[in-house]
Image (cartoon, rainbow, N blue to C red):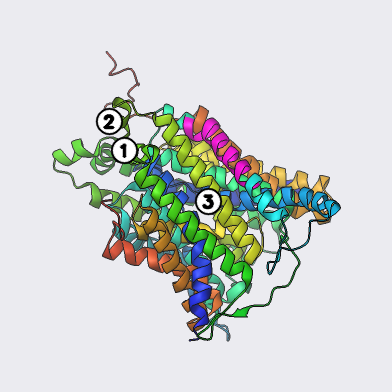
């Protein structure tokens, strides 16, 4: 029975990563925007939701003790606004300027989480974040199972929304901009504005994911939102298959499984004083894996399905079907 | 604000500037933002440290291991720095061979190469942490007394030496790039690689020279930072944002620009530490970056974005 509870716990975390991956897939997979600050958008969402939903405490602003769903909405809004600011600054420039700026925002927000104690609780973070189905907390299986159902439902809802959007005229233009900006522009589309819309949508999903994660774990701290997280999410999306929403979800579960498994092997095999050191090998493995996939199978496990409209069905690479 | 801010800023800025020169050259010539560059600094410092560990014992056996003049280190460090620079060059050329070069030949988008550099940087940094642990290391345990250099400012002999060497390196490099035929070829490739190839320039050689310069300076900057502060696996990662901000502030492809950008960021950091507080130091580069992107995205000496 313990395995069942742990399995549900594991999958719930994987689902929150799947949500982040879906957000990143809008930015990278569909639009070709390289966001090196994923952790910043997730963290901003988590802290926002924490601020709104925790009970009042003395040593920092809030909490405002509002219901969880308000926290979710606020988190998505903050994720979106932050993405808008970053995107408006850099999206019209070379693609790597966005990468550098998002990298900068990740470092700066990390500093803010640590240093703005009146707002974030400093290095100790925020605790007592209300957990969804908190009344079941005493019963591990029921609690983890209901949270799994909730997070899976959210992944599915976001998945449906994105599938719908990507097959809509908006999604088609977005891919057209990604494939050939000049051609799209000559058709009267505005690439800068479209990219910005996609970047904001992706950032809002990441913010929401941060809130969902925070409300499952119940505690957040600056150390949860290190560049490490950005890196994991990228590995998930690239392994699963960028451009493919199922690929994003599959990659999240798979890479998280590799991560959790290698982590538990390390804690079994290495003595306690060497574990931190051995844990850095996990990162080496994921980094090498990311590079190998970029070299040998850039499309990932599930490649992007080339559809132009659901009414036309799938298109093969070799040209239209007879 | 004490005048010491000026010295602190110039010292930190020299490290950033040297690192940023390599970054700006790879950016202009290989056309991608290299997230691994910070880790070249850290690897350079650790490889130099390893060599100097071997050399130190050897030189002490020969009786010439004592510190030189007013400095905190003996002959071991300059000699191992040369070896460290050579090893860092090998590291970058190797990485280019197995990763970046392959992606380039396949015609991968610049942004795919950026992503690969991001993955490689995580792997390289964690490998350092695995080999050398996260504990800081030092080139020397000698204590140095800061000496008065006028106007209420103080600097240690090590600091003055490294700043002087930085100035010499930057001038030599600037003359090399503006006067030599290899330097002209580098500028031609940064303008238009296809056309440069058509004109019979050896583009592969230009790429190799770019990595050699970038890696050599990165190792120097890493050793400088290791000598004046300390050596940590994350030292390169912590410098990455200042490096990018300095390269963009100076204008992509400009060597004097990168150096000046580095000095400006170093000074801005020193002022921030005094006025706002040391805990916000790492945010300074981001503020500078945002200001440059708003006010002058092409940078001080850059052409266009």
Which is nearer the eye, A30 or B49?
B49
Corner quadrant of residue A162 = top left
Corner quadrant of residue A245 = top left
Residue placed under numbered mark 2 in the picture? B195
Question: In terms of sequence position, does the residue under pointer 3 or pointer 1 come before the other?
Answer: 1
Residue B249 spot, x, y in % from top left: 36, 61
- Say whether residue A136 is visible: no
Which chain is home to disc 2? B
Q: Please, what secondary structure does the residue beneath circle 1 have?
A: helix
**Labels 1 and 2 in the same subunit:** yes
Residue placed under numbered mark 1 in the picture? B188
Q: What is the residue that sits farthest to the top in this orientation?
A: A322
Q: Is residue B213 above or below residue A144?
A: above
Q: Residue at x 53, y 74 (%)?
A: B8
Q: Is residue A33 above or below residue A135?
A: above
Q: Please, what secondary structure does the residue beneath circle 3 have?
A: helix
Span highlighted in magenta in the image: B84-101
Q: Which mark is residue B143?
A: none
Q: Is residue B273 above or below residue A312?
A: below
Residue A19 spot, x, y in % from top left: 48, 50
Which chain is home to disc 1? B
Q: CA distance from mark 3 to mark 1?
A: 22 Å
């Amino acid at each position: 029975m313990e395995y069942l509870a742990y399995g549900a716990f594991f999958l719930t975390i994987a689902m929150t990563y799947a949500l982040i991956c879906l957000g990143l897939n809008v930015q990278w997979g569909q639009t070709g925007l390289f966001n090196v600050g994923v952790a910043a958008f997730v963290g901003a969402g988590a802290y926002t939701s924490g601020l709104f939903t925790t009970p009042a405490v003395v040593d920092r602003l809030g909490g405002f003790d509002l219901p969880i769903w308000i926290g979710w909405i606020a988190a998505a809004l903050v994720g979106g606004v932050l993405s808008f600011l970053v995107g408006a600054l850099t999206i019209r420039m070379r693609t790597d300027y966005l990468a550098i700026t998002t990298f900068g925002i990740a470092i700066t927000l990390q500093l803010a989480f640590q240093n703005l104690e009146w707002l974030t609780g400093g290095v100790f973070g925020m605790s007592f974040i209300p957990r969804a189905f908190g009344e079941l907390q005493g019963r591990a299986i029921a609690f983890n199972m209901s949270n799994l159902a909730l997070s899976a439902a959210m992944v599915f809802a976001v998945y449906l929304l994105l599938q719908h959007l990507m097959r809509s005229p908006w999604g088609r233009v977005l891919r057209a901009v990604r494939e050939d900006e000049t051609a799209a522009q000559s058709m009267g589309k505005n690439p800068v504005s479209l990219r910005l819309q996609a970047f904001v949508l992706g950032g809002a999903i990441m913010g929401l994911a941060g809130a969902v994660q925070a409300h499952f774990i119940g505690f957040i701290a600056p150390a949860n939102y290190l560049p490490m997280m950005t890196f994991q999410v990228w590995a998930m999306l690239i392994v699963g298959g960028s451009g493919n929403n199922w690929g994003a979800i599959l990659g999240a579960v798979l890479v998280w499984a590799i991560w959790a498994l290698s982590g538990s092997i390390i804690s079994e095999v290495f003595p306690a004083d060497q574990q931190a050191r051995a844990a850095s090998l996990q990162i080496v493995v994921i980094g090498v894996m990311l590079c190998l996939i970029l070299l040998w199978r850039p499309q990932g496990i599930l490649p992007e399905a080339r559809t132009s409209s659901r009414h036309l069905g799938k298109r093969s690479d070799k040209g239209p079907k007879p | 604000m004490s005048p010491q801010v000026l010295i602190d800023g110039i010292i930190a800025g020299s490290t950033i500037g040297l690192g940023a020169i390599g970054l700006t050259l790879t950016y202009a010539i290989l056309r991608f933002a290299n997230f691994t560059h910070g880790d070249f600094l850290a690897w350079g410092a650790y490889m130099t440290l390893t060599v100097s560990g071997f050399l130190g014992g050897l030189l002490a056996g020969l009786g010439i291991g004592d510190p030189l003049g007013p400095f905190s280190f003996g002959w071991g460090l300059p000699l191992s720095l040369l070896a460290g620079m050579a090893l860092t060059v090998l590291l970058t050329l190797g990485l280019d061979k197995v990763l970046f070069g392959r992606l380039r030949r396949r015609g991968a988008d610049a942004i795919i190469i950026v992503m690969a550099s991001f993955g490689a940087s995580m792997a390289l940094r964690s490998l350092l942490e695995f080999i050398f642990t996260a504990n800081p290391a030092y080139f020397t345990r000698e204590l140095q007394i800061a000496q008065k250099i006028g106007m209420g400012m103080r600097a240690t002999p090590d600091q003055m030496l490294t700043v002087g060497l930085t100035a010499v390196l930057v001038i030599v490099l600037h003359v090399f790039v503006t006067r030599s035929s290899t330097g002209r070829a580098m500028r031609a490739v940064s303008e238009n690689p296809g056309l440069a190839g058509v004109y019979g320039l050896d583009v592969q050689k230009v790429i190799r020279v770019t990595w050699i310069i970038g890696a050599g300076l990165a190792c120097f900057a890493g050793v400088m930072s290791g000598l004046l502060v300390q050596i940590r696996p994350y030292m390169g990662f912590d410098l990455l944002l200042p490096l990018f901000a300095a390269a963009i502030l100076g204008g992509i492809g400009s060597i004097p620009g990168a150096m000046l950008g580095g000095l400006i960021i170093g000074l801005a950091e020193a002022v921030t530490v005094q006025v706002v507080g040391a805990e916000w130091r790492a945010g300074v580069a981001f503020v500078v970056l945002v200001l440059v992107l708003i006010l002058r995205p092409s940078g001080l000496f850059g052409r266009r974005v």
